[in-house]
Image (cartoon, rainbow, N blue to C red):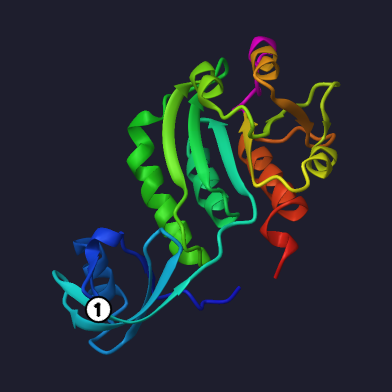
């Protein structure tokens, strides 16, 4: 894959003032020590609002690095804003989901606990935010997905917008192929996917999700790991409804 975005950093809007970008200490160390960039070198910036900034380094030391803005462009909004509500799986698998879901264009990641949860996730939220930022930098995204830890599935269902389609990935016999559900949702501008951890969702959880309006989606005849299910579902939605439909 292309390395076009190698020197690319996320900088929040508060650190971009009067045409000058100020990098965090960690970014300053990376720019000066790891990448060995020097004043005058070009660096690409995005601020999470859809803006892309072309800049040139003004100072580049391990403790203080800044750049001057030389141009600005705005990326178009995603065709479909996709939310992923994920019951946190065990081990390092959530790290992978956060990174790859960001690359695949997810707009919002909600971390949940479920009947088959094996760990809590709130204490790792900051780590996952850092992973999402790094994945956005690497993949050329102009936005960083929103991350939230709601914990309880019922809290998520209660707060989910009634008008926004909700798709529960489920291997039960009543589930329809995800591609068929996407065909029914042509023209949708937002939707959310619900994916379980090891063991999926128990019958009570499925019933409550259906009562909240969730549609059940089948992801094929093979048993998928939690991380595989989440990323496969995102890819199908992007290919059927989202950014993969336009160049």
Tell me which residue sits at (50%, 63%) in the image: 141
Q: Nearer the viewer, residue 123 or 158?
A: 158
| Prevailing secondary structure of the magenta residues | loop
Residue 24 lies, in percent from the top left, at: 22, 62
Residue 2 lies, in percent from the top left, at: 57, 76
Residue 85 lies, in percent from the top left, at: 56, 33
Residue 201 on the magenta span:
yes
Tell me which residue sits at (50%, 26%) in the image: 112
- Residue reaching furthest to the top: 204
115 vs 165: above or below? above
Residue beneath label 1, please? 67
In the rendered structure, which segment of residues is drawn in magenta?
Answer: 196-205
211 vs 60: above or below? above
Report how many numbered discs are placed on residues in the image. Answer: 1
Location of residue 144 (image quadrant): bottom left
Residue 83 on the magenta span:
no
Q: Residues within 10 Å of mark 1 (few under 14, many from 20)?
A: many
- Residue reaching furthest to the bottom: 40
Residue 156 lies, in percent from the top left, at: 52, 24
Which quadrant would the N terminus be assigned to in this image?
bottom right
Location of residue 225 (image quadrant): top right
Which quadrant would the C terminus be assigned to in this image?
bottom right
Secondary element under disc 1, as helix, strand or loop, is: strand
Tell me which residue sits at (68%, 38%) in the image: 229
Taking the image as shown, residue 59 lies to the left or right of residue 179, namely: left
Q: Nearer the viewer, residue 6 or 237?
A: 237
């Amino acid at each position: 894959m292309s390395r076009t975005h190698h020197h690319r950093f996320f900088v929040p809007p508060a650190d971009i003032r009067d045409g000058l970008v100020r990098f965090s200490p960690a970014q300053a160390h990376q720019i000066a020590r790891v990448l060995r960039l020097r004043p005058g070198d070009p660096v690409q910036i995005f601020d999470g609002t859809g803006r892309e900034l072309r800049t040139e380094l003004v100072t580049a030391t391990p403790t203080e690095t800044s750049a001057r803005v030389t141009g600005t462009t705005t990326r178009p909004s995603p065709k479909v804003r996709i939310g992923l509500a994920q019951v946190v799986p065990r081990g390092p698998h959530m790290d992978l989901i956060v990174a790859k879901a960001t690359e695949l264009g997810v707009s919002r990641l909600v971390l949940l606990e479920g009947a088959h949860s094996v760990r809590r996730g709130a204490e790792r939220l900051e780590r996952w935010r850092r992973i999402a930022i790094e994945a956005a930098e690497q993949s050329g995204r102009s936005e960083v997905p929103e991350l939230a830890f709601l914990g309880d599935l019922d809290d998520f269902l209660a707060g989910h917008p009634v008008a926004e389609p909700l798709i529960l990935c489920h291997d039960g016999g009543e589930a329809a192929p995800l591609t068929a559900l996407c065909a029914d949702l042509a023209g949708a501008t937002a939707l959310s996917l619900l994916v379980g951890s090891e063991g999926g969702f128990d019958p009570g959880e499925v019933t409550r999700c259906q009562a909240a309006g969730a549609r059940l989606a089948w992801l094929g005849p093979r048993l998928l790991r939690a991380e595989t299910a989440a990323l496969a579902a995102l890819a199908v939605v992007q290919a059927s409804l989202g950014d993969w439909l336009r160049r």
